[in-house]
Image (spheres, rainbow, N blue to C red):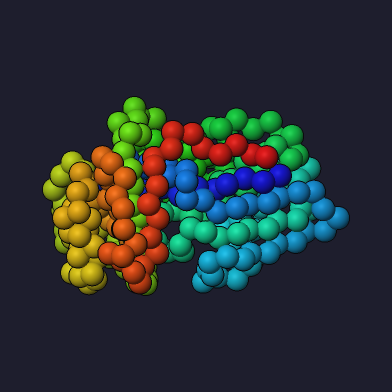
Amino acid sequence: MRLYPNCKVNIGLHVTGKRPDGYHTLDTIFYPIYNLSDILDIDHAPTLSFSCDGIAVDCNSDDNLVMRCYRLMQQRYPQIGPVAIRLTKRIPFGAGLGGGSSDAAHTALALNLLFNLGLSREQLAAEVEPLGADCPFFIYNVPCHATGTGEILTPVEDEWKHLYIVLVKPDIAISTREAYAGIDSLGNLIFRPGFNDFELSVFPQHPRLELIKQTLLDHGAVYASLSGSGATVFGLFSSPITDINSLFADCFVCATTLSPQPHAAV
């Protein structure tokens, strides 16, 4: 079985508070980008195996969210047998695009089909929630208003499907933990529609990201923002933009349409 775990961007992100357990609450729109995806192959096999190629990730196989999801699901559902898993990474790691969370969610979707578990989307979302705050979103994989830690999801009307998107990820690493610590140091934040609060703490530390955002706006973006805690900055355009790669020659760049449909499992 082959699936295509896609990425997402955040259209606006407001950090609304911090819970006693240390997790932060937020208010955001998760928007799926179907045309930038990893490739996940999962099939029945005599013994469990996992391989990963493509863009390098900074964790070993046991810690990969795909394997963590497999182990979590197998503990809950003993009828899950051994599988051969191959993950081809095309979504940059640590980019604020949710690639790892998407891989985990799509692993759960695949196991549900392969072993006829009969789990609903709601049940699958609950299963993957411990793996990451945005994992439940990728089970539904449609534009959603997210609150709580990201697990309270309400589908929203797609106001952006006619637009084009440019994703720009420079060679910058941002720790989500450090990004949240920077937000906490700012105290109470004022809600501003469409604004990503992480820009307040991340841009001063990484001024190039602010420059990328301004460059996108200067070249006609109707909206530009950091995605998640970064380090990807994206711009939405009303028409295709040409020669975008020349503007960001040393960055990962993806320019695509906002496709209205996700890939189906094959």
Q: Which is more toward the observer, 49 or 260?
A: 260
**Left or right of 193: which side holds 141?**
right
Task: Say left or right for 265 vs 234.
Answer: right
Query: From the image, which quarter does the C terminus lie in?
Result: top right
- Residue 114 seen: yes
Q: Nearer the viewer, residue 53 or 188?
A: 53
Figure quadrant of the N terminus = top right
Task: Report whether 90 appears left or right of 51.
Answer: left
Residue 233 horizontal/vertical position (percent): 30, 57
Q: Quadrant of residue 265?
A: top right
Q: Position of residue 182 (x, y in %)?
A: 24, 65
Name which residue lies at 22% across and 48% down.
221
Q: Please indicate, yes or no, whether residue 185 appears anywhere in the rendered image.
A: no
Image position, residue 29 (x, y; %):
32, 40
Q: Residue at x 15, y 44 (%)?
A: 192
Tell me residue 47's x, y (percent). 82, 58
Residue at screen point 38% across, 60% down:
253
232 on left or right of 129:
left
Closer-to-camera residue (200/244): 244
Residue in the image at 30% along x and 61% along y = 180
